[in-house]
Amino acid sequence: MVELVGDGAEERHRLGVVGGLAALSLDAMASVAYGPEAVVLVLALAGGAGMGFTLPVTLTIAGLLAVLTVSYRQVIATFPEGGGAYGVAKRYLGRRSSLVAAASLVVDYVLNVAVSVAAGVAALTSAVPGLLPYTLSLCLGVLALITAVNYRGIASSARLFVGPTVIFVAAILTVVVAGLFRDHPIVSEHTVVTEHAVQAQADGLKTVGVLLLLKAFANGCAALTGVEAIANAVPSFRRPRARHAQRAEVALGGLLAVMLIGIAVLIERFSIRPVSGVTVLSQVTEASLGHGAPFYVVQFATVVLLALAANTSFGGLPVLARLLAADNNLPHLFALRAQRQVHRYGIGFLALTAAALLIAANGDMNTLVPLFAIGVFVGFTLSQAGMVRHWWTDRPRGWQGRLALNGFGALLTGVAAVIVTATKFLEGGWLILVMVPVLVLVMQRVHHAYDRIGERLALGSVPAPPRPGRALVVVPVAGVSTLTRQALAAALSLGDRVVAVRVVHPDEEEDHVRFMAEWERWNPDVDLVVISDERRRLVEPIVEYVRGVRESQVFVLIPEVEPEHVWERVLQNQRGAVLAHALRRDTDSVICRMRFRVAPRDEHRRSPQPVH
């Protein structure tokens, strides 16, 4: 009965389909705000002829989205433990490829948090210019808020984000539907071309042809970042986990495709062009709904969702980090979960690295955007290639069509990865090409370290039966007191032989004579070793003594006073902590730090217990 209750409590902190969309798809949903604009900015360089390709390019992106959605639906079924591209690459492409996929996803998750927070704050400061001087502070504040929400548990954060997600999707669909019923825009189109387009034309970048379309396609593929997050976080869903995750993935793909295609149709219908200081989505909204209250609802919903889109990474990266830790590629602390089923170390790592990026960029979105989306396409390509290998190796019923679909997807995402990297290399893309190999190297070193530890511990083999041996307990003493009595009493219960050790310096002769008189009068029936040290060292004489004893098993019990009040800790000399550190570093002894709690006289004092 207790196990069932505990299991039910754990399930309450997991996601359903709607919760999965709210917690894990905000990045992909928010890309509607900048994906179409990224396409238009490139096609506008070719004038009206180029703008005529807005819908075909968007349809191509939607086709790739469909391929990715179907592929990740199969990934979820094949890898219900989560991991996405990492899990696929690990099983079918080898360990090194899996580490490349994992490193790419880690980089993209961190960048997604930084870009999403910076974009949301940028939209806010555009609406309220007076907040512009506080951009970095606002970015860090939003990041801290999202981190705090995620520390409460992913299901809790999902419930908080359902409302903004529903409002945003409803607002965009309203814009699309309203625009489809209009023959002309309510608000006349703007005529001022963006500074980006003007500069691009001045630099001679106006190119008509395949290269222009490929660049527009690569830019627009920024709208696809985040579609893998659900596959990475399957364990965060309720049972049946794979089915809930698959439904959430399909719902995400369908909603995103409808919104992207709908906005592209309206861009062509209303002859939308890039305008300085006005986003493409804002122009489409004005053309469909006018400049009244509905316009501001869409804008505000966009601002909120951009700020909250970082939650996708907070849902996906900790689960990926747990899988990497389970495979000995990251420190095992990343696999630990708190009471609310959150991986607090993964969340903390993500928050700190994103904060560092925001501080380095001073909260400027345009500094971070060139780094975005490179890593995720590497993951896309490896995932698709791994699924191709899966279908070829296992060959279930209907494998030929699925292999062709994943092969086509690998080709598309591979080409997109090359184009995105090439076009953004000088804008900061080179940093991603450096960071991914560095992360792979770090994970390899961690893995080798765990291998050495496992080999030393003989993990996987059956050890010899344990046999008792003689143990020596060494107790450093400074005087005759209740603390010394409690320490020696505890030591006598730990080992076969107990030795009290005292270090004497040349200028402490008088104090030592007094100590010896008290010791002989007390007569605790414990051997006393006196070490003379002329160099007035604090801990080295005890360390040297422990290293020289004959017993194979040595305990060192360090008695310490636990003050009644916290502030009284500053009165202690911390010699016990220094000695414990030196013994751990230079000996193989077992260290026990015994706390003697100082309580008020009228309280019943409990006997102190040694802490190993």
Image (tube, rainbow, N blue to C red):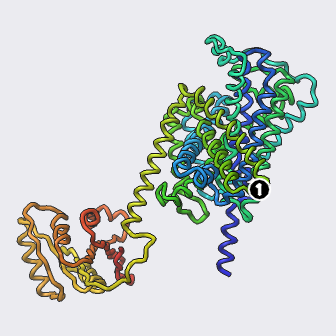
For residue 573, side relative to residue 351 (left or right): left
Tell me which residue sits at (76%, 46%) in the image.
252
In which image quadrant can residue 422 be found?
A: top right
Q: Is residue 266 visible?
A: yes
Query: What residue appears at the point 51 percent right and 31 percent down from the top-left corner?
Result: 430
- Counting from the top left corner in percent of width and height, residue 414 is at 64, 36
Quarter of the picture containing the C terminus is: bottom left
* Residue 156 visible in the shown view: no
Toward the viewer: 363 or 319?
319
Residue type, label 1: Val
- Residue 609 image-quadrant placement: bottom left
Q: Is residue 207 left or right of residue 426?
A: right
| Image position, residue 316 (x, y; %) | 62, 51
**On the rendered image, what quadrant is the N terminus found in?**
bottom right
Q: Position of residue 399 (x, y in %)?
A: 75, 52
Query: Against 226, is 559 above or below?
Result: below
Q: Is residue 170 above or below residue 609?
A: above
SS for dot 1: helix
Q: Badge 1 is on which residue?
A: 17
